[in-house]
């Protein structure tokens, strides 16, 4: 048994020396390129509690995407979502760290000392159980000792700090989950707006292309008439100027469409240069509250920003209570089992153990506990004020969203009537032009008015769609409802 323990001690010292040498010898290069190449957020999504319910699939971009497809890709691929998921993982780790306080601590240690300190000599020789009778306490000689042992520690009572720390960590996790809902709510609303902006820009290209084609056709007809002496040079010049303007409008429409497409790709976490084809398929969201009064009631119950502000109040009061517990004592149990020997010839007969409890109570700490309590109370006051501010901000947000939706709906009705009137006017002028009673300029002006009305009508239509999405965002519906819809489709 003695030789076995001795060999274990030698092996332990050898292992420690190897670990120290390995730590000193290894050097790690810290650089952005290495970290990005080695690390990945993929492992985050593999965690059961952090994995998104819908696996990211950028291959969807290879075919026409609907609004729902865009939302699905954004939820799974936008870096803001990855940041929120990482924060949730951090909160979950904090809970595990808080739970560790309820377990005992156990550690293995070994040490080597050499010297001629009388106190060290005496205590270590006694622990070796080899103190010779007649030892000169003033000049005992040289001491060399190896000590090998384990120690344990368990907190019996510390004023309830560990329990409160666990509650704080759990509340932090709830706040992290609300942060993710906040990000998803805003992200989905942004995706819907970007999608309809792109559709509107695509419609503008169609109208602008049609205008260029019409003006170019009329210019060719006018050139034939001019060669035959049936048109004036001024008519040719007027049409050439109009053609240049329409081509400029077409270029502007295409550039705007490219920018909208890049913005949509960016929201979906794809490269801005990614080519995306939109299917234009409608997405009918859940039925929204009909008016502001009903909407504000819903928003104050589910809007994640407000729920987070309320959790912050709870968290702040927990923090205040944590500081107050600084006035309370703590009680810890500890124990140690160890052996000492000059040549690592350890044996159970000469092993030592010690166990006990420690009661610790800070009587005076320079008023720092009082200062921390005052600081915690100030943090709670800030949280209460932030809750009131958040409530008012949400009320204004919801009211603004409903007013803008009403305005967009009214503008859409006016635009639809304007298109009908412009179509009728164009038909009338076209008949007059073909009969020779209206000039080409009058005809093109009527067509331009019709096309402008069509553009306003499409813009008003998509603005109304975006206003509906903005109401959903203001109420906090976007994230919750879209995820339900996605879950239903996945099934």
Image: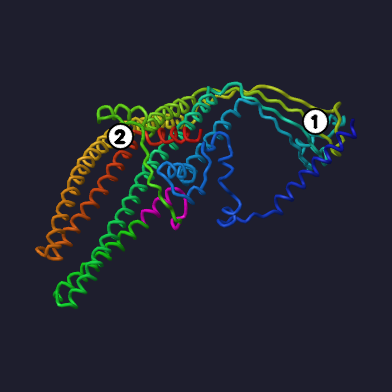
Residue 69, position as x, y percentages in the image:
44, 43
- Residue 390, given in percent of the width and then of the height, sits at 32, 34
In what element is the residue under mark 2?
helix
Distance in Å between CA atoms under marks 2 and 1: 70 Å
Span highlighted in magenta in the image:
259-273
Mark 1 neighbour density, 10 Å: few (under 14) some (14–19) many (20 or more) = some
Question: Looking at the image, which is closer to me, 341 or 48?
Answer: 48
Instruction: Name the residue beneath numbered marker 1.
Output: 127
Task: Report which quarter residue 470 is drawn in.
Answer: top left
426 displayed left or right of 467: left
Q: At 40% from the left edge and 43% from the top edge, which residue is drawn?
A: 67
Q: Which residue matches tag 2?
A: 394
Answer few, some or many: residues within 10 Å of disc 2's Cα (few below 14, many 20 plus, some between 14 and 19): many
Q: Nearer the viewer, residue 36 or 309?
A: 36
- Residue 327, above or below 464: above
Residue 260 part of the magenta segment: yes
Nearer to us in this view, 487 or 298: 487
Q: Is residue 115 magenta?
A: no
Is label 2 or label 1 in front? 2
Instruction: Residue 269: give x, y in percent of width and height.
Output: 46, 49
Say which residue appears at 69% left-offset and 30% top-offset.
106
């Amino acid at each position: 048994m003695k030789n076995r323990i001795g060999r274990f001690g030698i092996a332990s010292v050898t292992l420690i020396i190897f670990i120290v040498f390995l730590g000193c010898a290894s050097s790690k290069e810290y650089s952005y390129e290495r970290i990005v190449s080695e690390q990945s957020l993929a492992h985050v999504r593999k965690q059961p509690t952090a994995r998104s319910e819908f696996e990211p699939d950028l291959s969807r971009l290879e075919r026409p995407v609907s609004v729902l497809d865009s939302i699905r890709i954004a939820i799974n691929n936008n870096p803001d979502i990855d940041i929120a998921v990482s924060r949730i993982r951090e909160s979950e780790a904090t809970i595990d760290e808080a739970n560790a306080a309820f377990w005992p601590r156990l550690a293995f240690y070994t040490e080597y000392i050499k010297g001629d300190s009388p106190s060290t000599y005496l205590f270590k020789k006694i622990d070796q159980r080899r103190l010779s009778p007649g030892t000169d306490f003033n000049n005992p000689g040289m001491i060399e000792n190896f000590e090998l042992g384990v120690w344990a520690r368990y907190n019996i009572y510390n004023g309830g700090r560990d329990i409160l720390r666990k509650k704080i960590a759990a509340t932090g996790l709830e706040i992290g989950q609300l942060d993710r809902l906040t990000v998803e709510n805003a992200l989905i609303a942004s995706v819907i707006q970007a999608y309809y902006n792109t559709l509107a820009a695509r419609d503008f290209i169609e109208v602008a292309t049609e205008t260029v084609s019409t003006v170019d056709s009329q210019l060719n007809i006018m050139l034939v008439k001019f060669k035959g002496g049936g048109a004036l040079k001024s008519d040719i010049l007027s049409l050439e100027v109009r053609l240049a303007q329409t081509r400029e409008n077409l270029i502007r429409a295409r550039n705007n469409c490219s920018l909208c497409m890049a913005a949509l790709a960016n929201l979906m976490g794809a490269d801005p240069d990614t080519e995306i084809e939109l299917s234009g398929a409608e997405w009918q969201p859940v039925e929204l509250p009909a008016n502001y009064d009903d909407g504000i009631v819903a928003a104050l119950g589910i809007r994640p920003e407000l729920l987070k502000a309320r959790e912050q109040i709870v968290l702040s009061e927990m923090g205040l209570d944590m500081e107050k517990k600084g006035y309370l004592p703590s009680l810890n149990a500890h124990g140690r089992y160890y052996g000492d020997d000059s040549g690592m010839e350890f044996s159970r007969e000469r092993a030592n153990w010690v166990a006990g409890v420690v009661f610790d109570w800070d009587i005076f700490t320079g008023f720092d506990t009082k200062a921390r309590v005052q600081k915690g109370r100030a943090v709670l006051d800030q949280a209460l004020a932030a809750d009131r501010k958040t409530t008012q901000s949400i009320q204004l947000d919801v009211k603004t969203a409903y007013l803008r939706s009403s305005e967009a709906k009214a503008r859409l009705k006016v635009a639809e009537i304007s298109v009908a009137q412009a179509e009728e006017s164009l038909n009338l002028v076209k008949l007059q032009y073909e009969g020779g009673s209206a000039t080409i300029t009058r005809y093109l002006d009527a067509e331009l008015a019709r096309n402008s009305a069509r553009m306003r009508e499409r813009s008003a239509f998509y603005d109304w769609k975006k206003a509906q999405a903005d109401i959903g965002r203001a109420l906090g519906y976007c994230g919750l409802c879209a995820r339900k819809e996605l879950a239903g489709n996945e099934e």
